[in-house]
Amino acid sequence: MEEKRLIYLDHAATTRTHPDVVSAMLPYFTEHFGNPSSLYDLASASRTAIEDARKKVATAVGAVPEEIFFTSGGTESDNWALRGVASAYGKKGRHIITSAIEHHAILHTCEALEREGYEVTYLPVDEYGMVQPGAVEAAIRPDTILISVMLANNEIGTIQPIKEIGGIARSHKVLFHTDAVQGVGQIPIDVRELNVDLLSISGHKFSGPKGVGALYIRRGTRIHPLIHGGAQEKKRRAGTENVPGIVGLGRAIERAIAIMPEKSERLTKLRDTLITGLLRIPKSRLNGHPTERLPNNANIIFEYIEGESILLLLNAHGIAASSGSACTSASLDPSHVLLACGIPHEVAHGSLRLTLGEETTAEEIAYVLDVVPKVVQRLRDMSPLTPKELRTR
Ligand code: PLP
Protein backbone atom coordinates (compact mmCIF):
# COMPACT_ATOMS: atom_id res chain seq x y z
CA MET A 1 0.00 0.00 0.00
CA GLU A 2 1.26 3.46 -0.85
CA GLU A 3 2.20 5.46 2.23
CA LYS A 4 -0.12 8.39 2.85
CA ARG A 5 1.52 11.70 2.05
CA LEU A 6 2.02 14.06 5.00
CA ILE A 7 2.33 17.77 4.52
CA TYR A 8 2.95 19.01 8.00
CA LEU A 9 1.96 22.65 8.38
CA ASP A 10 1.40 22.82 12.10
CA HIS A 11 4.85 23.79 13.35
CA ALA A 12 3.38 26.25 15.86
CA ALA A 13 1.80 23.24 17.60
CA THR A 14 5.02 21.27 17.65
CA THR A 15 7.99 20.25 15.50
CA ARG A 16 9.71 16.99 14.69
CA THR A 17 12.73 16.50 16.97
CA HIS A 18 15.73 16.89 14.68
CA PRO A 19 17.84 13.70 14.30
CA ASP A 20 20.98 15.59 15.45
CA VAL A 21 19.12 16.54 18.61
CA VAL A 22 18.01 12.96 19.19
CA SER A 23 21.61 11.75 18.71
CA ALA A 24 22.87 14.28 21.23
CA MET A 25 20.26 13.12 23.75
CA LEU A 26 20.64 9.34 23.44
CA PRO A 27 23.83 8.81 25.53
CA TYR A 28 22.13 10.56 28.45
CA PHE A 29 19.51 7.82 28.63
CA THR A 30 22.00 4.98 28.63
CA GLU A 31 25.72 5.65 29.09
CA HIS A 32 25.57 8.86 31.14
CA PHE A 33 22.55 8.05 33.25
CA GLY A 34 23.90 9.38 36.55
CA ASN A 35 21.89 11.68 38.75
CA PRO A 36 23.51 15.10 38.39
CA SER A 37 23.27 15.63 42.15
CA SER A 38 25.40 12.56 42.98
CA LEU A 39 29.08 12.82 43.87
CA TYR A 40 30.78 10.05 41.85
CA ASP A 41 32.35 10.41 38.41
CA LEU A 42 29.33 9.00 36.55
CA ALA A 43 27.23 11.94 37.73
CA SER A 44 29.68 14.59 36.61
CA ALA A 45 28.97 13.83 32.93
CA SER A 46 25.30 14.69 33.55
CA ARG A 47 26.24 17.83 35.46
CA THR A 48 28.62 18.98 32.73
CA ALA A 49 26.00 18.33 30.06
CA ILE A 50 23.43 20.44 31.91
CA GLU A 51 25.84 23.35 32.29
CA ASP A 52 26.82 23.08 28.65
CA ALA A 53 23.14 23.28 27.63
CA ARG A 54 22.61 26.22 29.98
CA LYS A 55 25.40 28.11 28.18
CA LYS A 56 23.81 27.37 24.81
CA VAL A 57 20.38 28.60 25.89
CA ALA A 58 21.90 31.71 27.48
CA THR A 59 23.90 32.51 24.34
CA ALA A 60 20.80 32.09 22.17
CA VAL A 61 18.90 34.83 24.01
CA GLY A 62 21.73 37.14 25.06
CA ALA A 63 21.68 36.11 28.73
CA VAL A 64 24.36 34.73 31.04
CA PRO A 65 24.14 31.05 32.06
CA GLU A 66 23.26 31.89 35.70
CA GLU A 67 20.06 33.48 34.42
CA ILE A 68 18.73 30.30 32.74
CA PHE A 69 16.60 27.80 34.70
CA PHE A 70 15.34 24.57 33.17
CA THR A 71 11.66 23.67 33.40
CA SER A 72 9.26 21.10 31.98
CA GLY A 73 8.28 23.43 29.11
CA GLY A 74 6.56 26.66 28.15
CA THR A 75 3.54 26.07 30.37
CA GLU A 76 5.64 25.64 33.51
CA SER A 77 7.84 28.62 32.62
CA ASP A 78 4.74 30.81 32.22
CA ASN A 79 3.17 29.53 35.44
CA TRP A 80 6.43 30.04 37.31
CA ALA A 81 6.92 33.60 36.04
CA LEU A 82 3.43 34.67 37.08
CA ARG A 83 3.06 32.75 40.31
CA GLY A 84 6.66 33.20 41.39
CA VAL A 85 6.48 36.99 41.07
CA ALA A 86 2.94 37.14 42.51
CA SER A 87 4.14 35.26 45.56
CA ALA A 88 7.37 37.25 46.00
CA TYR A 89 5.66 40.63 45.58
CA GLY A 90 2.21 39.85 47.04
CA LYS A 91 2.83 42.17 49.99
CA LYS A 92 3.83 45.08 47.75
CA GLY A 93 0.90 44.81 45.37
CA ARG A 94 -1.51 42.41 43.76
CA HIS A 95 -2.07 43.87 40.30
CA ILE A 96 -0.89 42.16 37.11
CA ILE A 97 -1.18 43.41 33.53
CA THR A 98 -1.40 41.04 30.58
CA SER A 99 -3.05 40.93 27.15
CA ALA A 100 -6.30 39.37 26.01
CA ILE A 101 -4.52 37.22 23.41
CA GLU A 102 -2.01 35.37 25.59
CA HIS A 103 -1.68 31.60 25.51
CA HIS A 104 -3.85 29.78 28.04
CA ALA A 105 -0.72 28.99 30.07
CA ILE A 106 -0.81 32.70 30.95
CA LEU A 107 -4.55 33.40 30.86
CA HIS A 108 -5.63 30.45 32.97
CA THR A 109 -2.87 31.14 35.49
CA CYS A 110 -4.07 34.75 35.70
CA GLU A 111 -7.62 33.53 36.27
CA ALA A 112 -6.39 31.24 39.05
CA LEU A 113 -4.51 34.17 40.61
CA GLU A 114 -7.68 36.27 40.44
CA ARG A 115 -9.44 33.61 42.49
CA GLU A 116 -6.62 33.95 45.01
CA GLY A 117 -7.11 37.69 45.43
CA TYR A 118 -4.92 39.17 42.67
CA GLU A 119 -6.32 41.67 40.18
CA VAL A 120 -5.56 41.28 36.49
CA THR A 121 -5.95 43.81 33.68
CA TYR A 122 -6.39 42.11 30.28
CA LEU A 123 -5.30 44.66 27.68
CA PRO A 124 -7.24 44.74 24.41
CA VAL A 125 -5.49 44.45 21.04
CA ASP A 126 -6.14 46.16 17.72
CA GLU A 127 -7.50 44.42 14.63
CA TYR A 128 -4.03 43.01 13.89
CA GLY A 129 -3.60 41.59 17.37
CA MET A 130 -1.18 44.33 18.49
CA VAL A 131 -0.93 45.50 22.08
CA GLN A 132 -0.50 49.29 22.25
CA PRO A 133 2.46 50.31 24.47
CA GLY A 134 0.50 53.41 25.51
CA ALA A 135 -2.27 51.19 26.85
CA VAL A 136 0.29 49.25 28.91
CA GLU A 137 1.55 52.48 30.45
CA ALA A 138 -1.97 53.72 31.16
CA ALA A 139 -2.81 50.46 32.97
CA ILE A 140 0.14 50.66 35.39
CA ARG A 141 -0.92 51.41 38.99
CA PRO A 142 1.06 51.85 42.19
CA ASP A 143 0.20 48.23 43.13
CA THR A 144 1.21 46.74 39.73
CA ILE A 145 3.83 44.04 40.28
CA LEU A 146 4.13 42.39 36.87
CA ILE A 147 3.44 42.93 33.18
CA SER A 148 3.29 39.86 30.94
CA VAL A 149 2.92 40.28 27.18
CA MET A 150 3.83 37.56 24.69
CA LEU A 151 6.60 38.09 22.13
CA ALA A 152 4.66 36.53 19.24
CA ASN A 153 1.19 35.08 19.13
CA ASN A 154 0.81 31.36 18.53
CA GLU A 155 -2.36 31.66 16.45
CA ILE A 156 -2.00 34.76 14.31
CA GLY A 157 1.79 35.23 14.50
CA THR A 158 1.67 38.93 15.41
CA ILE A 159 4.96 40.13 16.91
CA GLN A 160 4.48 42.57 19.80
CA PRO A 161 6.50 45.76 20.45
CA ILE A 162 8.26 44.05 23.36
CA LYS A 163 11.24 46.39 23.53
CA GLU A 164 8.97 49.41 23.93
CA ILE A 165 6.72 47.72 26.49
CA GLY A 166 9.82 46.58 28.37
CA GLY A 167 11.13 50.14 28.42
CA ILE A 168 7.86 51.35 29.90
CA ALA A 169 7.85 48.59 32.52
CA ARG A 170 11.40 49.44 33.51
CA SER A 171 10.74 53.16 33.78
CA HIS A 172 7.89 52.37 36.19
CA LYS A 173 10.00 49.77 38.07
CA VAL A 174 7.54 47.00 37.27
CA LEU A 175 8.82 43.53 36.36
CA PHE A 176 8.25 42.43 32.76
CA HIS A 177 7.75 38.87 31.52
CA THR A 178 7.40 37.77 27.92
CA ASP A 179 6.23 34.39 26.68
CA ALA A 180 8.72 33.90 23.84
CA VAL A 181 7.72 30.29 23.15
CA GLN A 182 6.72 31.02 19.54
CA GLY A 183 9.54 33.46 18.87
CA VAL A 184 12.66 31.44 19.71
CA GLY A 185 14.36 30.21 16.55
CA GLN A 186 12.07 32.35 14.38
CA ILE A 187 13.24 35.87 15.14
CA PRO A 188 16.34 37.21 16.89
CA ILE A 189 15.90 37.59 20.65
CA ASP A 190 18.12 39.50 23.04
CA VAL A 191 16.84 39.79 26.58
CA ARG A 192 18.86 42.94 27.30
CA GLU A 193 17.72 44.72 24.18
CA LEU A 194 14.10 43.73 24.85
CA ASN A 195 14.22 45.04 28.45
CA VAL A 196 12.68 41.85 29.81
CA ASP A 197 13.16 40.44 33.32
CA LEU A 198 11.64 37.02 32.61
CA LEU A 199 11.29 35.09 29.34
CA SER A 200 9.70 31.69 28.64
CA ILE A 201 11.17 29.13 26.23
CA SER A 202 9.89 25.72 25.09
CA GLY A 203 12.06 23.10 23.38
CA HIS A 204 9.54 21.40 21.13
CA LYS A 205 8.78 24.53 19.10
CA PHE A 206 12.25 24.58 17.51
CA SER A 207 13.01 20.93 16.72
CA GLY A 208 13.86 20.08 20.32
CA PRO A 209 12.16 17.53 22.55
CA LYS A 210 8.78 17.98 24.21
CA GLY A 211 8.47 18.43 27.95
CA VAL A 212 11.52 20.62 28.44
CA GLY A 213 11.90 24.39 28.47
CA ALA A 214 13.54 27.21 30.32
CA LEU A 215 12.80 30.42 32.13
CA TYR A 216 15.22 33.30 31.83
CA ILE A 217 15.32 35.19 35.11
CA ARG A 218 17.33 38.39 34.99
CA ARG A 219 20.00 38.50 37.69
CA GLY A 220 18.63 40.10 40.84
CA THR A 221 14.94 39.45 40.04
CA ARG A 222 12.95 38.37 43.08
CA ILE A 223 10.88 35.29 42.33
CA HIS A 224 9.69 32.40 44.49
CA PRO A 225 9.91 28.77 43.35
CA LEU A 226 6.87 27.12 41.82
CA ILE A 227 8.07 23.58 42.49
CA HIS A 228 9.43 22.73 45.93
CA GLY A 229 11.70 19.84 46.85
CA GLY A 230 15.43 19.26 46.35
CA ALA A 231 18.12 21.87 45.81
CA GLN A 232 18.36 21.60 42.02
CA GLU A 233 18.63 24.71 39.83
CA LYS A 234 20.14 26.77 42.66
CA LYS A 235 17.18 25.87 44.89
CA ARG A 236 14.80 27.63 42.54
CA ARG A 237 13.30 24.66 40.66
CA ALA A 238 13.28 21.34 42.46
CA GLY A 239 13.27 17.87 40.91
CA THR A 240 15.89 15.61 39.35
CA GLU A 241 16.82 17.26 36.09
CA ASN A 242 15.53 15.90 32.78
CA VAL A 243 19.11 15.44 31.59
CA PRO A 244 18.43 14.06 28.07
CA GLY A 245 15.72 16.69 27.57
CA ILE A 246 17.99 19.51 28.71
CA VAL A 247 20.79 18.26 26.43
CA GLY A 248 18.26 18.16 23.57
CA LEU A 249 17.07 21.67 24.34
CA GLY A 250 20.64 22.97 24.27
CA ARG A 251 21.46 21.28 20.97
CA ALA A 252 18.15 22.36 19.42
CA ILE A 253 18.47 26.02 20.37
CA GLU A 254 22.07 26.13 19.12
CA ARG A 255 20.91 24.67 15.78
CA ALA A 256 17.85 26.91 15.61
CA ILE A 257 19.94 30.05 16.03
CA ALA A 258 22.54 28.88 13.49
CA ILE A 259 19.98 28.17 10.76
CA MET A 260 17.64 31.07 11.57
CA PRO A 261 18.78 33.74 9.08
CA GLU A 262 18.53 31.45 6.07
CA LYS A 263 15.41 29.68 7.32
CA SER A 264 13.53 32.91 8.10
CA GLU A 265 14.28 34.33 4.70
CA ARG A 266 13.16 31.17 2.92
CA LEU A 267 10.03 30.70 5.03
CA THR A 268 9.00 34.35 4.73
CA LYS A 269 8.95 33.94 0.94
CA LEU A 270 6.99 30.69 1.14
CA ARG A 271 4.61 32.20 3.70
CA ASP A 272 3.93 35.17 1.44
CA THR A 273 3.33 32.93 -1.55
CA LEU A 274 0.89 30.96 0.57
CA ILE A 275 -0.91 34.05 1.90
CA THR A 276 -1.15 35.69 -1.52
CA GLY A 277 -2.48 32.49 -3.06
CA LEU A 278 -5.06 31.86 -0.34
CA LEU A 279 -6.31 35.45 -0.40
CA ARG A 280 -7.35 34.87 -4.03
CA ILE A 281 -10.20 32.80 -2.63
CA PRO A 282 -13.27 35.07 -2.48
CA LYS A 283 -14.37 36.28 0.97
CA SER A 284 -11.08 35.46 2.62
CA ARG A 285 -8.85 37.65 4.78
CA LEU A 286 -5.60 37.53 6.65
CA ASN A 287 -5.60 37.31 10.44
CA GLY A 288 -2.79 39.02 12.31
CA HIS A 289 -0.42 41.77 11.24
CA PRO A 290 0.52 41.98 7.54
CA THR A 291 4.22 42.61 8.22
CA GLU A 292 4.93 42.32 11.96
CA ARG A 293 4.34 38.58 11.92
CA LEU A 294 6.33 35.40 12.39
CA PRO A 295 8.08 34.22 9.22
CA ASN A 296 6.29 30.88 9.39
CA ASN A 297 2.70 31.90 10.15
CA ALA A 298 -0.23 32.18 7.74
CA ASN A 299 -3.69 32.48 9.28
CA ILE A 300 -6.63 33.06 6.98
CA ILE A 301 -10.36 33.31 7.52
CA PHE A 302 -12.75 31.98 4.92
CA GLU A 303 -16.27 33.24 5.40
CA TYR A 304 -19.09 30.68 5.37
CA ILE A 305 -16.69 27.92 6.37
CA GLU A 306 -16.44 25.99 9.58
CA GLY A 307 -12.86 25.50 10.80
CA GLU A 308 -13.22 21.88 11.90
CA SER A 309 -14.63 20.70 8.57
CA ILE A 310 -11.81 22.29 6.60
CA LEU A 311 -9.28 20.56 8.87
CA LEU A 312 -10.89 17.18 8.30
CA LEU A 313 -10.93 17.59 4.53
CA LEU A 314 -7.34 18.83 4.50
CA ASN A 315 -6.36 15.85 6.62
CA ALA A 316 -7.92 13.59 4.00
CA HIS A 317 -5.55 15.25 1.50
CA GLY A 318 -2.58 14.60 3.79
CA ILE A 319 -2.32 18.18 5.07
CA ALA A 320 -1.92 18.64 8.82
CA ALA A 321 -3.12 22.12 9.83
CA SER A 322 -4.89 23.82 12.67
CA SER A 323 -7.85 26.12 13.13
CA GLY A 324 -6.57 27.82 16.26
CA SER A 325 -4.10 26.71 18.90
CA ALA A 326 -3.65 22.96 19.28
CA CYS A 327 -4.91 23.09 22.85
CA THR A 328 -8.26 24.56 21.84
CA SER A 329 -8.80 22.91 18.48
CA ALA A 330 -10.79 20.18 20.22
CA SER A 331 -13.24 22.77 21.53
CA LEU A 332 -15.94 24.38 19.45
CA ASP A 333 -15.55 27.85 20.94
CA PRO A 334 -14.04 30.32 18.50
CA SER A 335 -10.52 31.42 19.28
CA HIS A 336 -10.20 34.05 22.03
CA VAL A 337 -7.43 35.61 19.95
CA LEU A 338 -9.60 36.18 16.89
CA LEU A 339 -12.48 37.47 19.02
CA ALA A 340 -10.08 39.92 20.70
CA CYS A 341 -9.08 41.16 17.22
CA GLY A 342 -12.72 42.09 16.70
CA ILE A 343 -13.63 39.27 14.34
CA PRO A 344 -17.30 38.36 14.71
CA HIS A 345 -18.13 35.07 16.42
CA GLU A 346 -19.61 33.37 13.36
CA VAL A 347 -16.74 34.38 11.06
CA ALA A 348 -14.00 33.48 13.58
CA HIS A 349 -15.02 29.82 13.20
CA GLY A 350 -13.71 29.73 9.64
CA SER A 351 -10.03 30.30 10.37
CA LEU A 352 -7.18 28.16 9.09
CA ARG A 353 -3.69 28.35 10.59
CA LEU A 354 -0.83 27.01 8.50
CA THR A 355 2.58 27.19 10.16
CA LEU A 356 5.70 26.34 8.17
CA GLY A 357 8.92 24.76 9.37
CA GLU A 358 12.44 23.98 8.24
CA GLU A 359 11.24 20.91 6.31
CA THR A 360 8.56 22.81 4.37
CA THR A 361 9.16 22.95 0.61
CA ALA A 362 7.91 25.14 -2.24
CA GLU A 363 6.36 22.05 -3.78
CA GLU A 364 4.30 21.47 -0.62
CA ILE A 365 3.06 25.05 -0.66
CA ALA A 366 2.06 24.66 -4.31
CA TYR A 367 0.12 21.51 -3.40
CA VAL A 368 -1.66 23.32 -0.56
CA LEU A 369 -2.54 26.16 -2.90
CA ASP A 370 -4.07 23.63 -5.24
CA VAL A 371 -6.06 21.79 -2.56
CA VAL A 372 -7.36 24.55 -0.26
CA PRO A 373 -9.45 26.48 -2.84
CA LYS A 374 -11.15 23.21 -3.89
CA VAL A 375 -11.85 22.25 -0.29
CA VAL A 376 -13.23 25.71 0.53
CA GLN A 377 -15.47 25.58 -2.54
CA ARG A 378 -16.71 22.12 -1.67
CA LEU A 379 -17.64 23.21 1.85
CA ARG A 380 -19.29 26.38 0.60
CA ASP A 381 -21.34 24.36 -1.89
CA MET A 382 -22.49 22.13 0.98
CA SER A 383 -23.44 24.89 3.41
CA PRO A 384 -26.97 26.34 3.41
CA LEU A 385 -25.49 29.64 4.63
CA THR A 386 -23.36 30.26 1.52
CA PRO A 387 -24.76 33.08 -0.62
CA LYS A 388 -25.64 32.24 -4.22
CA GLU A 389 -22.75 34.16 -5.78
CA LEU A 390 -20.20 31.99 -3.96
CA ARG A 391 -21.74 28.69 -5.01
CA THR A 392 -20.77 26.61 -8.01
CA ARG A 393 -23.95 24.57 -7.74
N1 PLP B 1 3.06 29.74 25.18
C1 PLP B 1 2.84 29.75 23.85
C2 PLP B 1 2.77 31.05 23.13
C3 PLP B 1 2.68 28.55 23.16
O1 PLP B 1 2.45 28.57 21.85
C4 PLP B 1 2.75 27.33 23.88
C5 PLP B 1 2.53 26.03 23.21
O2 PLP B 1 1.65 25.89 22.38
C6 PLP B 1 3.00 27.38 25.27
C7 PLP B 1 3.15 28.60 25.87
C8 PLP B 1 3.09 26.13 26.08
O3 PLP B 1 4.33 25.49 25.88
P1 PLP B 1 4.51 23.94 26.21
O4 PLP B 1 3.77 23.18 25.17
O5 PLP B 1 5.99 23.72 26.16
O6 PLP B 1 3.97 23.71 27.58
Image (cartoon, grey):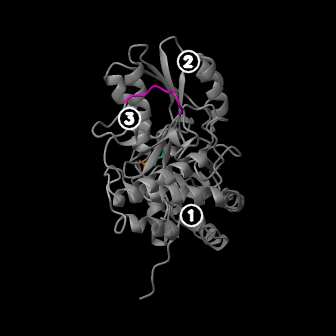
Instruction: Give the total of numbered labels.
Output: 3
At mark 2, the secondary structure is helix
How far apart, in angstroms, are the residues tagged by discs 3 and 2?
Answer: 20 Å
**Residue at the spot x=48%, y=43% of the render?**
346
Residue 295 placement, left or right of 174 = right
Residue labelled with disc 1: 377
Residue labelled with disc 2: 139
Residue labelled with disc 3: 108
**Crowd tier of the residue under label 1, counting other residues whose Cα lies within 10 Å: few below 14, some 14–19, many 20 or above:** some
Q: Nearer the viewer, residue 69 or 179?
A: 69
Three-letter amino acid code at the position of disc 3: His
Rendering quarter of residue 225: top left
Would you say the magenta stretch is mainly helix, strand or loop?
loop
Q: Assess whether mark 3 and mark 1 are in contact (beta carbons under 8 angstroms).
A: no
Residue 275: x and y, percent? Answer: 67, 57
Q: Nearer the viewer, residue 281 or 203?
A: 203
Q: Dividing the image into 4 quarters, which one contains the C terminus?
A: bottom right
Q: Which residues are magenta?
A: 218-224
* Vertical placement of residue 267 versus 187, above or below: below
How far apart, in angstroms, are the residues tagged by discs 2 and 1?
Answer: 45 Å
Three-letter amino acid code at the position of disc 2: Ala
At mark 1, the secondary structure is helix
Residue 232 seen from this side? yes
